[in-house]
Image (tube, helix red, strand yellow):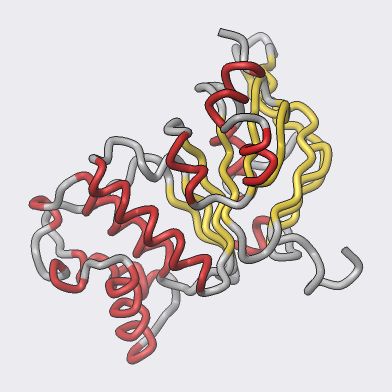
Amino acid sequence: MNSPLDAPAVWLERLVKDYASDWRGGRVRALDGVTLAVARGSVCALVGANGSGKSTALKLCAGLVRPTAGGCRVAGLTPAEAARCGRVAYLPEETLLPDFDSARGFLRRLAAIGGIDGAAAGAAVETALAQTGLAALADRPLATFSKGQRQRVGLAQALLRGPDILLLDEPASGLDPHAQAALQALIVRQRALGRTVVLTAHFLTPLEEFCDQFVLLHGGRVIFEGSRAAVTARGGLERIYRKEVPP
């Protein structure tokens, strides 16, 4: 980890995150000493029950919240630095879109806000639309988009600045099987382009088809971490989940 080129895409070291629970100073620990390294150009799945710390981990990596203790590096930078220079992009579980706008118009506005000007903005928007399979729908009102199509707009938004690392919070939530398959193909294409993808998910079995690394969280702690081969050797992700996570 001495050279930035050798460093993991995402590196968490003994990461702790507490949230205030009441006005009297009570605290809830969302992450409790998480240590994790995600290799560059890989797809990592964070899995676990609601409240296990998955979304908090992504928000810390995106620079949206600060850790209580421990360290976090993204693309060799602090999360805030990585977000500022466009090295990392975050997709929340719910993508809020202006129904009155089109996908192309919405992305053009975001490009301008993000400091992408002129021809570069147009090229970035068209590339993002093409990568997410939205080119043919780009001028339709967003109000007419399905859940899966809206999710693809969110992904296009995340891709605008050409990030090295994508953080996707429950990207398959609410998608039908066809939309899930399209999302999976999109993620695989991002990996082929050399990008790193860290995602959270509730649907376990499909993840084994395309993810390289699996991290099972419970109570803010890592209780299993391994490669696809390690997951297969233990009978699959669902079997590991049932064994390791209390009902």
Q: What is the residue that sits farthest to the right in this orientation? A: 2
Relative vertical location of residue 87 with respect to residue 98 in this rendering, above or below: below
Rendered image quadrant of residue 57: top right
In screen coordinates, is 188 left or right of 33? left
In screen coordinates, is 142 left or right of 83? left
Q: What residue lies at 16% left-to-right and 69% top-to-bottom?
A: 138
Is residue 62 something that shows in the picture? no
Rendered image quadrant of residue 217: top right
Q: What residue lies at 29% left-to-right and 57% top-to-bottom?
A: 152
Q: What residue lies at 75% left-to-right and 50% top-to-bottom?
A: 37
Name the spot of residue 95 as percent of width and height, x first. 32, 46
Residue 166 vs residue 109, the one in the foreground: 166
In screen coordinates, is 245 left or right of 119? right
In screen coordinates, is 242 left or right of 67? left
Tell me the quarter of the image containing the N terminus. Answer: bottom right
Name the spot of residue 26 as percent of width and height, x first. 68, 12
Name the spot of residue 56 as percent of width and height, x first. 59, 35
